Image (tube, rainbow, N blue to C red):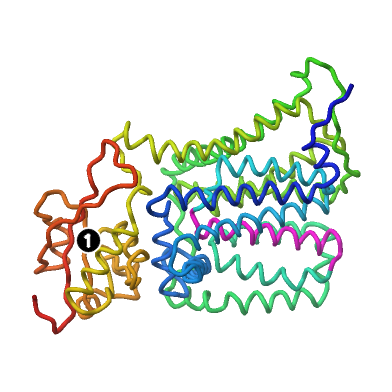
Amino acid sequence: MRFTSLIVELIRARPRMIFWIVVLAQAALWLFLPWLVYGSPPGDVATVLAFGREYQVGTHLGPPLAFWLADIAFRLAGGHIFGVYLAAQLCFILTFWALFKLGRAIVGAQQAMIAVLLTAVITAFSFPGAEFGPLIVARPLWALILLHTWQIIGQGQRRAWAALPVEIGLLVLTTSASLPLLAMLAVFVLATPKGRRALASMDTLYAAIVAAVLVLPYVIWLIRIDTLALPSLPAVSELQDRLLGWGGLLAGMLFALSGVALLLIANSRALDRKNEDPPLIFRPPVDPFARLFVYTFAIAPPLVLSFIAALFGRDQVVGGDGVALLLVGLAVVIAAGDLIALRRQHFLRTVWLLIVAAPVVVILGVTFIQPWVGSNEVKTSLPASDIGRFFGENFERRTGRPLAAVAGDPHLATLIGFAAHARPHVMFDAAPQETPWITPQRFAENGGVVVWRAADTAGTPPEEIRKRFPGLVPEVPRSFERLVKGRQSLVRIGWAIVRPAGQGSR
């Protein structure tokens, strides 16, 4: 007798409902987990907020859109980091919605749901869930570009032209990976008869004008700072190391796909000892052009983006794994055939849940166990709110003015930059050209706080900070409790106030 679990029946009968349950559950998990267990934001989120606060057209970190969106989300949440975590999950939801809609147009809703489940395990292994920034913002934009490109060239839907150029322009304003991604898209369109036919209309001119208008301010900024030239290629003697680096990046992406491999092994016929007829997920035959489209953008982006990263000595795939591996799950579904058998349904469900839960276990272990067994600092354990409140209130009490700027240790400075009530400017005093919105002269005029990791009870500033801020008078270091102290010492921060011009010492 054939047994079919409720989940499989719902995938057959209500794939859209299962889609929203799965995606919203994952989004809720990655929304509340960092909010509840992190004392300070993960990754470079604090830096993203520091740069987003300034609304620069461009910086050395790249195009500006993700930084602006981070600041907008932070302000809409009333100055709470929860808004940034929420923005990250909205990007996650939009990415999977576009992927599901693309899959539904190519393989039907039932198998599109399987593609979403496979992509979710790739997400669990490789895509950071809460580190809002260009890598996260680029994912929904690339997913929407692929969706609307398919609607135009594969389905002949002219109304998709209204959204496609806007998405292309926003992608250029988000990540430098937009250039190779759009180049791959252009090559595919020009190399296929359907693609060339879609371009032979006035819609192409409209799209070019809209995209150009969106990116024009950023292009002008690039011209002004003279950075339109490509980075210099490596010397011949370095090529071998760069090729080894490419291999390392490819190995990292293969590891990200290990969750898919585990599910395929768990569902293989070779392990089926009961020889029962498994439930089948059916789809109509896939159009050969659709198959070419999915395979192209499942294989080309990982190879091209990782090669570019290795060529220029980067340790991360250009655009991130989330963009490079976006269509791999859908490609696996297409390769599986018109009938997909789901064997050992309870076991499959358990394996999927374990893969999705693995990053959560890792984060909880790093947060609550590592402080007791390791010596390395967990950066998310720093109490950002307490640190920002202390330095903001002390500066205002001493000078009668809101804290205008903060400098010194970059990590501490960016934490204070978003956590202090006044949201001071952040200055990278070791490289002031990277924070052009505030110069050392302006810092001296308006005053601010200089912070560093205190190495002694006197709070002696490091030599390089003393050179950049002559006459600095250190205060008594301030100690802060970590989220989980464990065997680690308190966070001891040395600090000094640079008073605004015209104010003497008090």
**Where residue 28 sits in the image (x, y, percent)?**
59, 51
Check disc 1 and report its element: helix, strand or loop: strand
Count numbered badges in the picture.
1
Give the residue at the far top of this rendering: 273
User: Bounds of the magenta span?
Assistant: 131-157
Q: Is residue 164 magenta?
A: no
The residue carrying mark 1 is 451
Q: Is residue 132 magenta?
A: yes
Q: How many neighbours does mark 1 have within 10 angstroms: few (below 14), some (14-19), or many (20 or more)?
A: many
Q: Say above or below: 116 vs 263.
A: below
Which quadrant: the N terminus? top right
Q: Secondary structure of the magenta portion, mostly? A: helix
In the image, taking residue 140 as reference, residue 385 lies left or right, namely left
Which quadrant: the C terminus? bottom left
**Where residue 229 sits in the image (x, y, percent)?**
48, 66
The disc labelled 1 sits on which kind of residue? Val
Residue at image position (76%, 62%) is: 149
Q: Say above or below: 102 vs 434.
A: above
In the image, taking residue 469 as reference, residue 259 lies left or right, namely right
**Where residue 30 sits in the image (x, y, percent)?**
54, 49
Viewer-proximal residue among 225 and 32: 32
Residue at image position (79%, 22%) is: 269
Viewer-proximal residue among 36 and 240: 36
Residue at image position (45%, 39%) is: 364
**Where residue 265 sits in the image (x, y, percent)?**
70, 26
Viewer-proximal residue among 366 and 214: 366
The image quadrant of residue 115 is: top right
Q: Say above or below: 263 vs 474.
A: above
In the image, taking residue 296 as reference, residue 79 lies left or right, namely left
